[in-house]
Structures are given as C-alpha cells and as structure tokens.
Image: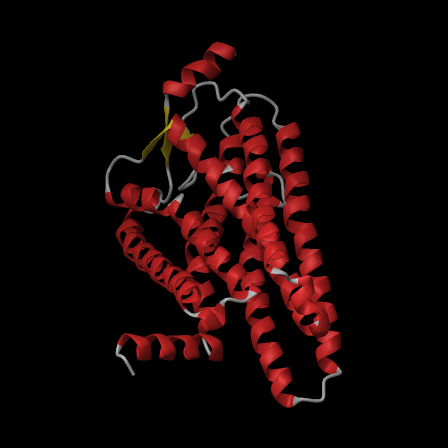
C-alpha cells in the first residue's frame, strides 16, 4: 500500500472534465474565458480603486479588497488549467499539480467562508453599533480579522488535503471532474472512505454551516435595526449595501452546500461539475458587479480618479 502511495508522487491524473460532451468544449472554453477575464478585470479594478482613493480606506472596502484578491486567487487555482484542457487533447495533471490545486482550492474557499462572516460583522457594527464603530473596527483589529481568515483557510486545507491524499488510489487515474476536488478524488479510492466522508461533512459544517448561521444572525440584527429607522435615505443605503452582501453570500454558499454537505457517494458527478463551474467561474465574476453596481462610493471614487488623471 505504501509503495503504491509513494509511486503515485511521480504519477499523473486525467481530468475527464466535460469530455462526455465534446461538442460543448469549444463553447465552454469561450464562455469560461470571458467570465475569467471579467473576474480578473473586475476584481483588479476593486483592489486598485480601493488602494488609490483615500475615501475608500474604510473597513468595508479593506475587506472587499481582500475578497477580490481571494476571488482572483481562487479562480486562478483551477480555471487556467481547465481552459488548457478544454482547448487541447491532453487532459492530464501531475500528481504534484493535483495536490497543489486541491490545497489552494480548499484553502481559498475556506478563507472566503470566514471572510464573508467578517464582512457581515463589519456591516452589523456599522448599522447596529454606529457610535462604537470606529472603536470596534479599529484598523489593527481589521487586519487581524483578515489575517485570521487567510490563516484558518490555509491551516484547515493542509490538514484536509493530507487526509485526502493519504488514502490509497490503487492506480486509478481518471478523475471525473475538471479540477482536483475532494469528492471526485474519494471516488478513486479502492478502500472504505467513510472516515474521509465524515471528516468532509464535519469540516464543511464548521466552515460552511456555522459561518452561514453567523451571517444570517448578523443580518437578522441589521434588519431589526433598519426597520426601526426613520430616515428613508438611511434605509435605502443600508439595504443597498447589505443586500449586495447577502446576494454574494447566497451565490457562494448555496452551491458549496450542494457539493460538500452530502456524502460524495450520493453526489451526481455530472451535476457536481456544473455546480462547481458556477461557484468557481460565475460567482467570482459577479461579485465586483454586485458590489459596485449603483454604489455611490465607487462611482465617486472613479470620478475623483478620472478627474485627477486628467487634471480636472
């Protein structure tokens, strides 16, 4: 068994991806490439704008910049390789590449779950505790919260990735997915994987269900506070900002729950591919649009930046 495991370090996997639908591969290549370019441009736009405009040097935009950087890394960990596989005939990935891909996908996905909780707490503090907001969201504390999101993601992924690749694969190489994902890899094993499936569900509950409950609790408190407001303008601003965050949360958490909160043996591989395609390609491209559309702060920052560029 150990010899089989050690030999696999010089081995490779074949990512079947969407090879069951060869007539769709060119179309998928074009669509995914467009979404990937939108993701790159949109998220880079938020990061650069938040850095250049001093009016956006607030906790909300600091966390939004972190989210944008996370989305850039998250999509880049799997999408470029998917595009190469869709365009070419070979659909292989080295063992080391598969390990690295799984590690970064899990790390960045987990970090995003935690970061979305942090962002909901920031909105809770801004709406429900406005007089104490500057104290609660001190810059040093904001940096600690962001760091905690990243560290929790990469630490958890190190443990989970190791546990996943410890199981013997017995020479199986055909991964029925477009990237190295835990449920797809567990299907390759020739031993009982119930312990791995249980670990996957427990970790998913900790980093998906608990964050989702905390986010909904924060927005429950925000809704209660907003309904007691007298100012119509204040209501519109709060609902605009918080509504955008809730849309992002829904687009991220719902597909992930469909994949990770049920045993891999009960997952339909084909259905899982398209759900994964949604949260790895579509969601990161929509986040910048959701947060910046009808956002007066961003529009004002763009006008100030353009005015400064042209010397107006």
Image quarter in which the C terminus is found: bottom left
In the picture, measured across the screen, residue 44 lies left or right of residue 204, that is: left
Question: Is 96 above or below relative to 88?
Answer: above
In the picture, measured across the screen, residue 294 lies left or right of residue 225, that is: left
In the picture, measured across the screen, residue 138 lies left or right of residue 18, that is: right
Residue 255 appears at what percent x and percent y? 55, 54
Residue at horizontal 37 percent and vertical 78 percent from the top: 304
Residue 190 appears at what percent x and percent y? 53, 21
Residue 167 appears at what percent x and percent y? 55, 22
Residue at horizontal 44 percent and vertical 54 percent from the top: 69
Residue at horizontal 47 percent and vertical 59 percent from the top: 65
Name the residue furthest left.
Answer: 88
Q: How many marks?
A: 0
**Closer to us: 192 or 152:** 152
Question: Is 41 above or below relative to 98?
Answer: below
- Residue 51, by quadrant, is bottom left
Residue 247 appears at what percent x and percent y? 56, 67
């Amino acid at each position: 068994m150990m010899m089989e495991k050690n030999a696999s370090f010089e081995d490779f996997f074949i990512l079947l991806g969407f090879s069951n639908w060869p007539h769709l591969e060119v179309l998928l290549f074009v669509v995914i490439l467009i979404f990937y370019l939108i993701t790159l441009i949109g998220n880079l736009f938020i990061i650069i704008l938040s850095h250049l405009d001093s009016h956006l040097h607030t906790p909300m935009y600091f966390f939004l910049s972190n989210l944008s950087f996370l989305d850039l890394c998250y999509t880049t960990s799997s999408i470029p390789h998917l595009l190469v596989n869709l365009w070419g005939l070979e659909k292989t990935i080295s063992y080391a590449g598969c390990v690295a891909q799984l590690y970064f996908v899990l790390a960045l996905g987990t970090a995003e779950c935690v970061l979305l909780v942090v962002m909901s707490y920031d909105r809770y503090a801004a709406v429900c505790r406005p007089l104490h907001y500057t104290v609660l969201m001190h810059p040093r504390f904001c940096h600690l919260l962001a760091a905690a999101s990243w560290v929790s993601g990469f630490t958890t992924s190190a443990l989970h990735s190791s546990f996943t690749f410890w199981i013997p694969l017995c020479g199986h190489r055909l991964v029925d997915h477009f990237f190295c994902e835990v449920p797809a890899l567990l299907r390759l094993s020739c031993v009982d994987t119930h312990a791995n499936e249980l670990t996957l569900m427990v970790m998913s509950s900790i980093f998906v269900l608990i964050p989702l409950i905390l986010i909904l609790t924060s927005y429950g408190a925000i809704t209660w506070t907003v309904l007691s407001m007298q100012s119509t303008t204040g209501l519109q601003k709060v609902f605009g900002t918080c509504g955008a965050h809730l849309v992002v949360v829904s687009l991220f958490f719902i597909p992930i729950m469909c994949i990770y909160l049920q045993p891999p043996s009960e997952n339909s591989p084909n259905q899982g591919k398209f759900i994964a395609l949604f949260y790895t390609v579509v969601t990161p491209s929509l986040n910048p649009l959701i947060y910046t559309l009808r956002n007066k702060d961003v529009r004002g920052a763009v006008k100030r930046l353009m005015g400064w560029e042209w010397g107006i």
